Image: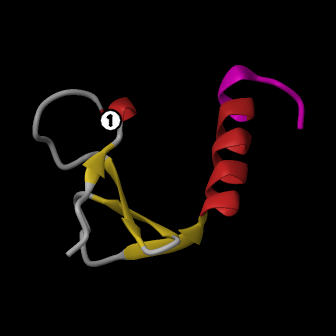
């Protein structure tokens, strides 16, 4: 059974607007709490690249 962890950027409370992260073997699982059956499976290097991309967009840094 996958244990899901809510993103710290999702804010407080128990609302349905958050991203959750889980792990299964060497893969990372992502889902939105408002649609739990829809799960995105990614490798750790792909997740790291996505997070770098999102962080650069948030800071306004050029890619």
* Crowd band around label 1 with a 10 angstrom C-alpha radius: few (<14), some (14–19), many (20+): some
The residue closer to the viewer here, 30 or 26, is 26
For the residue pair 2 and 7, the one nearer the viewer reads as 2
Q: Which x, y percent locates residue 48?
A: 66, 50
Relative to 14, residue 35 above or below: below
Q: Is residue 56 above or below residue 17?
A: above
Would you name the residue on which mark 1 appears? 10
Residue 60 is situated, as x and y percent measured from the top left of the image, at 76, 23
On screen, residue 9 above or below 37: above
Give above or below for 33 relative to 18. Answer: below
Could you tell me which quadrant the N terminus lies in?
Answer: bottom left
**Residue 55 left/right relative to 31:** right
Q: Which quarter of the figure has residue 43?
A: bottom right
**Horizontal arrangement in the rendering, residue 20 relative to residue 53 (left or right):** left
The quadrant where residue 11 appears:
top left
Q: Residue at x 19, y 27 (%)?
A: 12
Q: Residue furthest right?
A: 63
Total of numbered circles in the picture?
Answer: 1
Say what secondary structure mark 1 lies in: helix
Find residue 58 and report its horizontal and vertical position in percent.
65, 28
Q: Position of residue 14 (x, y in %)?
A: 10, 40
- Specify the segment rendered in magenta: 57-63
- Image quarter where the C terminus lies is top right
- The residue at the point 34 percent across, 32 percent down is 8
Is residue 61 part of the magenta span, yes or no?
yes
Q: How is the image coloured?
A: secondary structure
Give the residue drawn at x 14%, y 42%.
Answer: 15
Say whether residue 43 is magenta. no
């Amino acid at each position: 059974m996958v244990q899901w962890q809510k993103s710290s950027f999702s804010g407080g409370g128990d609302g349905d607007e958050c991203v959750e992260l889980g792990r299964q073997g060497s893969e990372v699982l992502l889902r939105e709490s408002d649609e739990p059956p829809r799960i995105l499976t990614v490798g750790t290097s792909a997740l790291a690249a996505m997070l770098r991309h999102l962080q650069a967009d948030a800071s306004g840094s050029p890619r």
